[in-house]
Amino acid sequence: MQLSPQQKFILFALGRCYEECNKRFAHVPLHVNMSKVRFIELARAAGMVHKGERALYRNLEGLEHKKLVSYDNRSLKLTERGQRHFQHLHQQLDPYVTVSFLLKSEDILKFTKVQARFK
């Protein structure tokens, strides 16, 4: 199934959002639910997307049409198929994300010797 880059990004963002939110409640028997409106507000407030609300709604509707996300009882969630696609995306992107976080969090100069030059 072909997904547009925007749909892949939305699917990945939604999956990561649920992963992070559910981590916070791992010690209690709770599961996070989010509506489309709240997800779009979160995505825009966090600076994940720079699109208008309508474009995000259309991307979510496209993912619904492809049966990757479902929206029932005012709750947006990944379907089994959507979860598999998210896991595939996560496996593809994880090495890049890991390197990025490592370079941001660690003092990389302690791992190697580099030369600094004036411009």
Image (tube, helix red, strand yellow):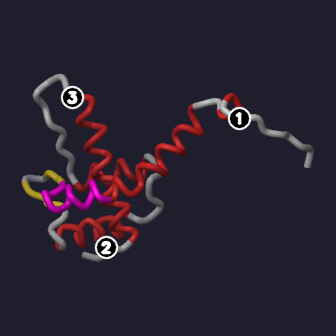
The residue sitting at the right extreme is: 118
Mark 1, residue position? 112
Percent position of residue 83, x then y: 20, 55
Q: Earlier in the sequence, mark 2 or mark 3?
A: 2
The reply to whether the magenta stretch includes residue 7 is no
- Position of residue 31 measured from the top left corner of the image (x, y, whole percent): 15, 37
Q: Residue at x 78, y 39 (%)?
A: 114
| Helix, strand or loop for disc 3 | loop
Q: Residues within 10 Å of mark 2 (few under 14, many from 20)?
A: few
Disc 2, disc 3: CB below 8 Å?
A: no
| Earlier residue among tags 2 and 1 | 2
Q: Quadrant of residue 117?
A: top right
Q: Is residue 94 left or right of residue 28?
A: right
Q: Nearer the viewer, mark 1 or mark 3?
A: 1
Most extreme residue toward the front is 112
Q: Amino acid at mark 2?
A: Leu
Residue 64 lies, with reference to residue 102, above or below; the image says: below
Which secondary structure, mark 2? loop
Under tag 1, what secondary structure? loop
Q: Which residues are magenta?
A: 78-88
Q: Nearer the viewer, residue 103 or 70?
A: 103
Q: Is residue 105 above or below residue 19?
A: above
Which residue was labeled with disc 2? 3
User: Label 3: which residue?
Assistant: 25
**Residue at coordinates 31% horizontally, 73% vertically from top-left?**
3
